[in-house]
Amino acid sequence: MSGGVDSSAAAALLLEQGYEVVGITLKLWPQDCVSRAEDKCCGPQAVMDARGVSHKLGIPYYLVDEAEDFQKQVINYFAEEYKAGRTPNPCVMCNEKLKFGTLINRARQLGAEYIATGHFARVEKRDNGRVLLKRGRDSRKDQSYFLFSLRQEQLARSLFPLGELTKTDTRSVARQNELKTADKEESMEICFVPDKDYGRFLQQARLVEKHRGEIVNLQGQVLGQHEGIEFYTIGQRKGLGISSPKPLYVIELDAARNRVVVGDESALERDEFSVERCNWIPYDAPPESIEVTAKIRYNHPGTPATVRPQAGGGAVVKLHVPQRAITPGQACVFYQEDLVVGGGWIR
């Protein structure tokens, strides 16, 4: 329970469906970060709201300190990816390692059969025992992208009570149950970077130090200097600090040579790339070729693609229409209509 309307409504729905429900908030923040998380997913106000909702619903409530694991599994990963010239997706990692990793272990300790969250997604169990992941019914709020890396054992123990609902329906459930979170605004940014200034967070957390390097064009000509590749991402235009007769964009981050490579917008388009550490949900061994709709980032609408799995857990993705700013480190998730076929991490 994050202290928001979604997890609050999910708890209420589970009670209506006859489940015995226990509310848990994972405290993910180190103590010295709490001031930045005042009203985020595990800040003091969020914890108070989650506890208040649990009291209103008449369910037990626990606050579980997972700050050490969050630091290791999510924040350190976040910093290391930026140092390597990639753009991380910490929400996917947090789901895989903590919310559907650590929390499942907590559930076992409490004798709970399932864990449930307020994600807008659906799980469907087949007769053969396999569990499928599907988009949430509300296409505007669907969060299946962030769950693509969940394994069968995690999906088998997961419930998503909001999967068939819209956001409006969810608020109605909270109002009907007189929950204090019914009209609470939702947070759209990464929980530990509430001001969206990733570079400042990395410096304040002493995970990254400024280090000068060259900004070069595609021909290798030096155009300027940067203070660290960690402060840039593919497709970025603003903040380059160099003058040019036409707009320049970040095309590549070369960690080995500490270079930011820039070029014009046309150089951002690609129609083929590879992914690694793939997770396939409907099957253990994927077909040699799969026709899918590929989402190269969460807010991407998706585009037709042919995926060819490779030895070693990777795949080659061939897009039918070139796409802009395909970014190493981001997740590429594959769909067939509402079904999540799987996905991998863009190389």
Image (cartoon, rainbow, N blue to C red):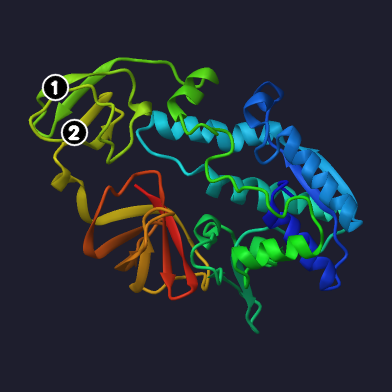
The local secondary structure at tag 2 comes to strand
Where 324 falls versus 261 (above or below)? below
Q: Which residue is mark 1?
A: 223
Q: In the picture provided, is 340 more to the left or to the right than 248? A: right
Q: Is residue 114 visible?
A: no
Residue at point 7% right, 30% down?
245
Question: Can you give x and y, in whole percent of width and height, for residue 321 in the image?
Answer: 21, 64
**Alpha-carbon span between mark 1 and mark 2:** 9 Å
Viewer-closest of 140 and 301: 140
Decide: is 114 above or below 124: above
Indicate the amino acid at tag 1: Leu
Q: Secondary structure at mark 1?
A: strand
Q: Residue at x 17, y 34 (%)?
A: 248
Q: Is residue 43 visible?
A: yes
- The structure residue drawn at horizontal position 69% and vertical position 49%, both measured from the top left corner, is 4
In which quarter of the view is residue 191 placed?
A: top right
Image quadrant of residue 116? bottom right
- 127 over 307 or under it: above or below: below
> Label 2: which residue?
262
Left or right: 262 as drawn, with respect to 82: left
Q: Which mark is residue 8?
A: none
Q: Label 1: how many residues lie within 10 Å, few (<14), some (14-19) or many (20+)? A: some
Decide: marks 1, 2 in contact (CB < 8 A)?
yes
